[in-house]
Image: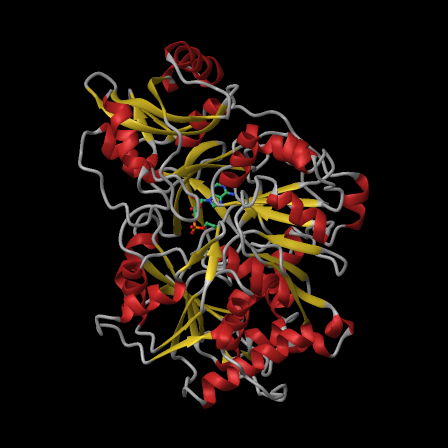
């Protein structure tokens, strides 16, 4: 990595939150002089500690200990603390199933369920503090109950997304050495039964895991009142969970998060970024199987006493307006979703959201990938009706919570720009040699330890040190980014995906954004193909909106559009029209596989793909 990444896309549009939003926001100013550790200590003290901490941070690079003498329990902070307040009878969870069935739980009811399951795990199965418990479940309330029951007894939860195959589940069971699996009798997806329990049976069938008990949580009939159940006091640095991330390359890494620091940031960032109020109905559409589901469906909102919407289904079942239907029906006020979903909504057309009353919404969020300015504007106009601030939140499984975004009551929003580091977080864009870039492109790094940072990779500290701490002396995120004169960050995508055309390093996000800006384009992914003259030539894979047809004339027009918008250097050599792009189950585009196609290599590992069939078609189109 000798040269730096360049900035091509110029985005000058900016949007300001309304005066009333600014006035009523949870955070209306930032004290820039505040000492960072003092700031975090103040946030940590908003949690309930059984025993207070003395040291804020002990840092032996790259190992951090936050609030180390303190003792607390994460589930207690999500439930018990509210039972002595007006929130006792407030709805904690509103769940809607695929078929429109609704179940709700007040804080008191959720507490009761969690205590029941916690007691069962402890007394019947002998689960102890520090034991690993794997959860492989559909998006039903029992999943939240299971996670919190583990936290309550100090078992380390490892949630595996319910769409993973038996062999992926087996790998994760083996790596974590889980003795207990929590699962469900059945789930549904797009109206069809999800054979969730069969997958678990298959995963453990070869007797090469450590699993001793499989608990089918939704059919477990636990009677009795267990609300006197004592939450286990955990040391601040005791692990709370492991979450496997496959990213877009390599063997899954078991990212380890601990208790006090993680929860401090989860609680603080939810309050500050989503501006949560007692009256809100908050909906994060992520599956609990991803970090977004952990931090912003469970720990962040519940520790703040929010009413959380949880939805079992998909955005297009039974019809493509299902999300808008849920928002209207439950009067959702805060909505947090992913760019891949937003681009699908755009593709399906403006009429669908227009059919629904979305006036309950007051704040929108985006996470998971760079959101192209085009998609940002659509979200702002068609869903937020030009009223709702959008928070474009950059973070990672590893960071535990949001690192870079705008604060909705303070900052100007710029489409495509995530924004600024949150208070207490320090970031930089670095040159390959580690010198900071004051304005322009480079590699994104977090400069100082933060409370919710990963504490390592389960069982593999060497890999932890190599992946995150070898490139720079500070944490290397693996993303390219730009910083501008106002300190705003724009995320350019994974550095492994960066293009190199005639000596220019170009982020995939900018070329893709200019393609998506072209009329009729729904999604785009670009990769570099070896080229004798330029080193790499850009090949673009593009999906079109319904009603558009890909042909040579359109390809030409699109190529010249990119050239006009961001420069001839970024012009794709070829555009391949395809009905879909290869994506991980969490919706991230896997450019690595497209690279295999253009390099004429056998297609690499497709086991993390949600839609593996698409690869054959893409290969055919490329070769034709
Ligand atoms: C990677 C982390 C963060 C929770 C969900 C994904 C990309 C994430 C943004 C954003 C641009 C983003 C980055 C990051 N990413 N949010 N707002 N703008 N890129 O967690 O699976 O660990 O993925 O997602 O590339 O490194 P994850």
Q: In this view, does 301 lie to the left or right of 505?
A: right
Residue 505 sits in which quadrant?
Answer: top left
Q: Position of residue 474 (x, y in %)?
A: 39, 52
**Residue 122 or residue 497, whichever sits in front:** 122
Q: Position of residue 144 (x, y in %)?
A: 54, 67
Q: In this view, does 77 lie above or below 298?
A: below
Q: Residue at x 64, y 51 (%)?
A: 273
**Residue 619 or residue 486, whichever sits in front:** 619
Q: Is residue 415 above or below residue 583?
A: above
Residue 436 sits in which quadrant?
Answer: top left
Q: Where is residue 256 in the image (x, y as percent from the top left)?
A: 40, 65
**Residue 571 or residue 473, whichever sits in front:** 571
- Residue 577 visible within the image: yes
Query: In which quadrant of the rendered image does the C terminus lie?
Result: top left
Q: Is residue 219 above or below residue 576?
A: below
Q: Which residue is drawn at 77% across and 58% down?
A: 279
Residue 79 sits in which quadrant?
Answer: bottom right
Q: Is residue 206 left or right of residue 134?
A: left
Q: How many marks?
A: 0
Query: In which quadrant of the rendered image does the N terminus lie?
Result: top left
The colour style of the image is secondary structure
Q: In this view, does 304 lie to the left or right of 598?
A: right
Q: In this view, does 471 lie above or below 84?
A: above
**Residue 488 or residue 520, whichever sits in front:** 520
- Residue 175 visible within the image: no
Q: Residue at x 56, y 25 (%)?
A: 11
Q: Where is residue 234 in the image (x, y as percent from the top left)?
A: 50, 80
């Amino acid at each position: 990595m000798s040269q730096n990444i360049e900035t091509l896309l110029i985005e000058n549009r900016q949007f300001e939150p309304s005066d009333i939003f600014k006035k009523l926001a949870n955070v209306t100013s930032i004290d820039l002089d505040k000492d960072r550790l003092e700031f975090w200590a103040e946030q940590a003290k908003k949690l309930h500690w059984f025993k207070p901490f003395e040291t804020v941070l002990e840092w032996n690079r790259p190992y951090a200990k936050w609030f180390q003498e303190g003792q607390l329990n994460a589930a207690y902070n999500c439930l018990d603390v509210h039972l002595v307040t007006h929130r006792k009878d407030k709805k904690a969870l509103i769940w809607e199933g695929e078929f429109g069935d609704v179940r709700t739980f007040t804080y008191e009811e959720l507490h009761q369920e969690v205590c029941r399951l916690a007691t069962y795990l402890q007394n019947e199965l002998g689960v102890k503090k520090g034991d690993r418990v794997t959860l492989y479940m559909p998006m039903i309330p029992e999943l939240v109950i299971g996670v919190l029951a583990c936290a309550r007894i100090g078992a380390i939860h490892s949630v595996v997304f319910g769409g993973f195959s038996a062999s992926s589940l087996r790998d994760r069971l083996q790596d974590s050495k889980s003795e207990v699996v929590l699962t469900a009798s059945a789930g549904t997806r797009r109206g069809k039964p999800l054979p969730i329990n069969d997958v678990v049976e298959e995963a453990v069938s070869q007797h090469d895991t450590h699993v001793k008990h499989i608990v089918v949580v939704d059919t477990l009939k636990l009677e009795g009142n267990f609300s006197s159940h004592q939450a286990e006091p955990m040391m601040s640095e005791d692990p709370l969970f492991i979450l496997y991330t496959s990213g877009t390359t390599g063997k899954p890494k078991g990212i380890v998060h601990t208790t006090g620091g993680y929860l401090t940031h989860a609680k603080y960032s939810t309050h500050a970024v989503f501006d949560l109020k007692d009256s809100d109905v908050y909906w994060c559409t992520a599956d609990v199987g991803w970090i977004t589901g952990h931090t912003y469906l469970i720990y962040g909102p519940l520790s703040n006493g929010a009413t959380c919407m949880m939805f079992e289904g998909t955005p297009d079942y039974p019809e493509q307006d299902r999300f808008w239907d849920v928002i209207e029906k439950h009067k959702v006020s805060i909505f947090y979703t992913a760019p891949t979903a937003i681009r699908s909504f755009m593709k399906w057309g403006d009429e669908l959201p227009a059919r629904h009353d979305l006036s309950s919404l007051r704040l929108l969020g985006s996470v998971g990938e760079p959101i192209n300015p085009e998609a940002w504007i659509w979200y702002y106009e068609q869903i937020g009706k030009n009223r709702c601030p959008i928070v474009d939140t950059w973070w990672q499984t590893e960071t535990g919570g949001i690192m870079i975004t705008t604060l909705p009551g303070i900052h100007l929003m710029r489409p495509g720009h995530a924004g600024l580091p949150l208070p207490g977080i320090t970031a930089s864009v670095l040159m390959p040699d580690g010198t900071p870039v004051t304005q322009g492109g480079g590699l994104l790094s977090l400069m100082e330890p933060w409370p919710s940072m990963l504490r390592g990779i389960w069982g593999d500290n060497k890999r932890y040190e190599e992946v995150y701490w070898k490139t720079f002396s500070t944490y290397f995120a693996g993303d390219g980014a730009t910083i501008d004169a106002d300190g705003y960050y724009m995320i350019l995508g994974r550095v492994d995906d960066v293009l190199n055309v005639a000596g220019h390093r170009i982020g995939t996000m900018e070329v893709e954004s200019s393609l998506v800006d072209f009329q009729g384009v729904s999604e785009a992914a670009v990769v570099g193909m070896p080229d004798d003259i330029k080193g790499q030539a850009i090949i673009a894979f593009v999906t079109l909106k319904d009603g558009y047809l890909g042909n040579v004339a359109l390809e030409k027009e699109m190529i010249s559009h990119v050239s006009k918008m961001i420069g001839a250097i970024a012009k794709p050599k070829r555009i391949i029209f395809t009905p879909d792009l290869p994506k991980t189950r969490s919706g991230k585009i896997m450019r690595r596989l497209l690279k295999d196609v253009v390099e004429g290599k056998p297609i690499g590992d497709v086991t993390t793909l949600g839609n593996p069939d698409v690869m054959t078609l893409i290969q055919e189109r490329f070769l034709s």
